[in-house]
Amino acid sequence: MSETTEAAVATPAAPTSPDARPPEAARPAWRRRLALLGFGNVGAVYVWLAIIVVFSIWAPDTFPTWGTVQTVLNQNAIPGFIALSLVVPLSARVFDLSVGNAMGLCSALVAWLLVERHVGIAGAIAITLLGGVAIGLVNATIVVVLRIDSFIGTLATGALMASGVTLLTDEQAIIGPQLSGSFAKIATSNVGGIATPVFVMFAVAIAVWVLLRYTVTGRRLYATGFNEEGAVLAGIPTRRLRFASLIVSGVVAGIAGVILTSQVGSGTPDIGPAYLLDAYAAVFLGATQLGGRFNAWGTVIAVLLVGTGKNGLAVVGAPLWAESMFSGVVLLAALALTNVERARDVRAWRSARRRRATAQ
Amino acid sequence: MPTTGTVASQPQRHSALRLAGVSKTFPGVVALRDVALDVAAGSVHALLGHNGCGKSTLVKLLAGVHHPDPGARAWIDGQELTLGSGEAAAALGLRFVHQDLGIVPELGAADNVGLALGYRRTRLGTIAWRRQTARVRELLARFGVAVDLDRPLAAATPVERTAVAIVRAVAGAEPGRGLLVLDEPTAAFARREVQQLFGLIRDVSATGTAVLLISHRLDEVLEIADRATVMRNGRIVGGGTLRDVTLPQLARWITGEPEREADEVAAAAAQPVAPAGARSARCALRVRGLEGLYLRGVDVSVGAGEIVGVAGLLGSGREELPYAVAGAAGAGVGGAWELDGRPVERIELRELQRRGLAFAPADRARESVFHDFTVRENATLAALSGARRHGLVTPPREGRLARGIVAGVGVGAETLGRSIATLSGGNQQKVVLGRWLAAQPGVLVLAEPTAGVDVGARHQLYELIAARAREGLGVLVASSDVQDLVSLCSRVLVLRDGVVARALEGEEIEERAIVAAMEGVE
């Protein structure tokens, strides 16, 4: 008995599962690669291309230009930052609803430091980024140490940050010569019309992408988000990861705040929260792309998709209400299409189509 | 006994459920082929077969989760049912208790029953809590279950959760009609609780409601079921009355293997796959004076290459012990740990894992499988650090690691890219086992390693574990399934009231002795 047992176990071709369906590996490689370009995987890219085509036909002289590319990229760097700052916490199922206010606070802080306290540029930026870390620490303490649900906890800390903005700005925009000149150059210096913040945003996107896709930490963040109890029992330091994820979003919000002030040229009150909902919309739309979890490139694609559409509407002189309606419709359409396709069990659908095709 | 004269030749009760020509094709796979089934009213009918044989698909068709291929017909109590609609099935009296129970873990028993059966209301329309609680308590008492009605079921034991789900389904059924489908109800049960469940199943069938029982535990099937139907590769391949059928015969129905091999499978259940007494001088794990919620000073030691079992009824500490040993039971656990002969200061799961202890918890769906991860990601989770190059995990390296892991536990590499939710329970468990073996532990702690795993896969799991033990791995197995312990262990600790009531070794390890020690009737 023991001899047969050993043989059975030692053979690499141990009895395989009865679950074995037609082997994935048998599909030719080009076909698998083609599936990566399928609607279910990168549907938003097709929607994006459609938007570009529509506006190019609608406004052939003004829309398909290098200027449009510059504008879309430059205007969406900050929404991109805010959206990207959410990807890491959301992967671990932590909702940070304070990022808008966090960015607003950091924006006001850097302006206040420069104008009111006459701190040098490097010092002001460093202190503001530390402020971002501090914001993350507060959020993380509330959510992870005190175990308050992130959804409500960060809503509360967001309110605290809003009061901090009022404290610094006194409801007045902070303006001063310190905000123009070399500080303004941070946001306005450019390479071929593409401003520095765009490159910084792509750098952040790459960092988030590598973290989530190619590191053990990234895998553990997803595991924490998918099944926290399982992750704990698998020895994953879930609390530490959720703590760190909120620090990440605080720091990215800090970067966004500095760039925002540099771009606008003033420390404006009430500027942050407006970014929050669009950022969540982009992250969730992005999560339907490229494999169905929160990820960096899906988020960037979503931000640029909505940004392109809004820019197109402005170019063709659409009425003011069209902009918000466009964001809402695109989001709903993209989410619905992705869901419909998933629900249908992609493969059932394809094989049925193939059968129909051969029958005809 | 109600008889109908519809069948001319012999008096027979009417069919509670009849199926004819039921097929189901998924892309690339025929899950069911022309299935016909007849379950007599008031009978207990077992549906048997290996994982992936089509049982689950059949249950999902009945529940309306899947639509059958055209041509399928079904009748409940003689009334035709259109398969593929959950509401129609419920209206005709089909009731289900699925393996995942379908309860709301955040709510207590009172609400879980109330949500399914409705609440007692006052004249104002608000819930009459006193009457509601009294009713739920009365329903649960029929099952001999005394749970705190308001405590969230998430905090209850698997048995209590199952009990509430079953009582809820049964209480909603009209007596004398319909069919109750129980999918692996005893998977997480200890012997005594199985008996409680059987008592209830007998009550139900006595009212005339039929019970369709899906189970991997053949001895239980023989005990409770009147008839069985066996499936293999999506077909009905046999079945009949279970009167005068023996365990080896039943096993042979399922495996469909020639007699000699089938005997081996049956014999394997009685024969330990690990050589008894294979104790080495080196101690992989030793815990002295283990204390916890239930445990009151238990000494556990596992030598390198030894497989030690832990048995015990619910509340004996058997459920708690693997968690406590692995440092996963939370606060209030005390004792002195030694791993590989060296004392461990900090008793935390992560510290113990770092020192070479691996732990596969009891509730696979909740505690160890990540349903949103692929098979590959589930397999590599514990050993992923080893697939790094310059700090990054590269897909080819992870792929190699994952292929090695699944090949080692007998799961096909073609499954790697799929969600783990597409695998059967047995294969999920193999992947989990592979995950922990890949971490190269010195000692492996398993809780309920074969819950929801079929006969064939169960034996493969035994052999995998035994093979690694022969290479020097120390294994601690806590299981409510005595078969696990008899098949695997060279030493079994039987817990009662939080202490080791008896330690069995070698030849002493057989089912009756373990059960007797558990129950304290020696």
Image: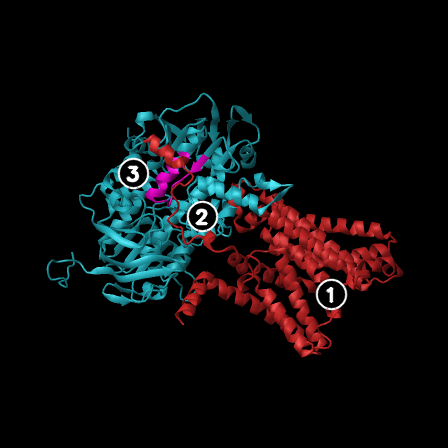
The colour style of the image is: by chain
Q: Quadrant of the N terminus of chain B?
A: bottom left
Q: Amino acid at mark 1?
A: Gln
State left or right for residue A316 relative to residue B113: right
Residue A25: x and y, percent? 47, 52
Q: Quadrant of the C terminus of chain B?
A: top left
Left or right, A128 with respect to B221, comes to: right
Res. B35 in view:
yes
Q: Is residue B316 above or below residue B252?
A: above
Can residue B330 be found in the magenta stretch? no
Q: In which quarter of the view is residue A73 placed?
A: bottom right
Q: Which residue is mark 2?
A: B365
Which chain is assigned red? Answer: A
The type of residue carrying mark 2 is Ala
Query: What separation in Å lies between label 2 and label 1 (alpha carbons)?
Result: 45 Å
Q: To which chain does the residue with label 2 belong?
A: B
**Front disc: 2 or 1:** 1
Residue A68 placement: quadrant: bottom right
Q: Which x, y percent locates residue B53? A: 33, 51
Magenta highlight range: B445-465
Q: Residue at x 23, y 40 (%)?
A: B259
Q: Amino acid at mark 3?
A: Val
SS under mark 3: helix
Tell me what hue chain B is rendered in: cyan
- As drawn, the residue found furthest toward the left would be B9
Mark 3 — on which chain does it sit? B
Q: Which mark is residue B265?
A: 3
Q: Position of residue B463 (x, y in %)?
A: 38, 35
Q: Which residue is mark 1?
A: A75
Distance from Cα at disc 2 to Cα at disc 3: 28 Å
Q: Earlier in the sequence, mark 2 or mark 3?
A: 3
